[in-house]
Amino acid sequence: MAHQKPNLPQKICPVCQRPFSWRKKWAKDWDNVKYCSERCKKNKK
């Protein structure tokens, strides 16, 4: 059975307009995270 994480903060990626959730690797830098992936980060306009 999958582990449920219902209360994680979310943001909307400005490139693909999709919601993405908090990840542990972003814990110290969540306020500065803007893009959901490296692909979107590279394709910003």
Image (cartoon, grey):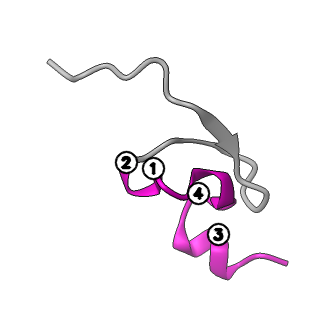
Badge 4 or badge 1: first in the primary sequence: 1
Q: State which mark lies toward you, 4 or 1.
A: 1
* Mark 4 to mark 1 CA distance (whole Å): 14 Å
Judged from the image, the secondary structure of the residue bearing numbered disc 1 is: loop
* Mark 1 to mark 3 CA distance (whole Å): 20 Å
Residue 26 covered by magenta stretch: yes
Residue kind at label 4, given as amino acid type: Cys
Q: Splitting the image into 4 quarters, where does residue 41 fall?
A: bottom right
- Tell me whether circle 3 and circle 4 mark residues in contact (CB < 8 Å): yes
Q: Residue at x 37, y 23 (%)?
A: 5
Badge 1 or badge 3: first in the primary sequence: 1
Question: Dot 1: within a 10 Å radius of its alpha carbon, few (fewer than 14), some, or many (20 or more) residues?
Answer: few
Q: Residue at x 45, y 50 (%)?
A: 27
Question: Dot 2: within a 10 Å radius of its alpha carbon, few (fewer than 14), some, or many (20 or more) residues?
Answer: few
Instruction: Give the position of the N terminus as an image quadrant.
Output: top left
* Mark 2 to mark 1 CA distance (whole Å): 5 Å
Judged from the image, the secondary structure of the residue bearing numbered disc 3 is: helix
Question: Dot 4: within a 10 Å radius of its alpha carbon, few (fewer than 14), some, or many (20 or more) residues?
Answer: many
Residue 36's disc number:
4
> Picture coordinates of residue 43 (x, y %)?
71, 78
Q: Which contiguous range is marked in magenta?
A: 24-45
- Tell me whether circle 2 and circle 1 mark residues in contact (CB < 8 Å): yes
Which residue carries the number 2 mark?
Answer: 24
Residue 40's disc number:
3
> Picture coordinates of residue 26 (x, y %)?
47, 55
Q: Splitting the image into 4 quarters, where does residue 19 fall?
A: top right
Q: Residue at x 54, y 64 (%)?
A: 37
* Mark 3 to mark 2 CA distance (whole Å): 19 Å
* Mark 3 to mark 4 CA distance (whole Å): 7 Å
> Picture coordinates of residue 36 (x, y %)?
58, 57
Which residue carries the number 1 mark?
Answer: 27
Viewer-side residue, 23 vs 14 = 23
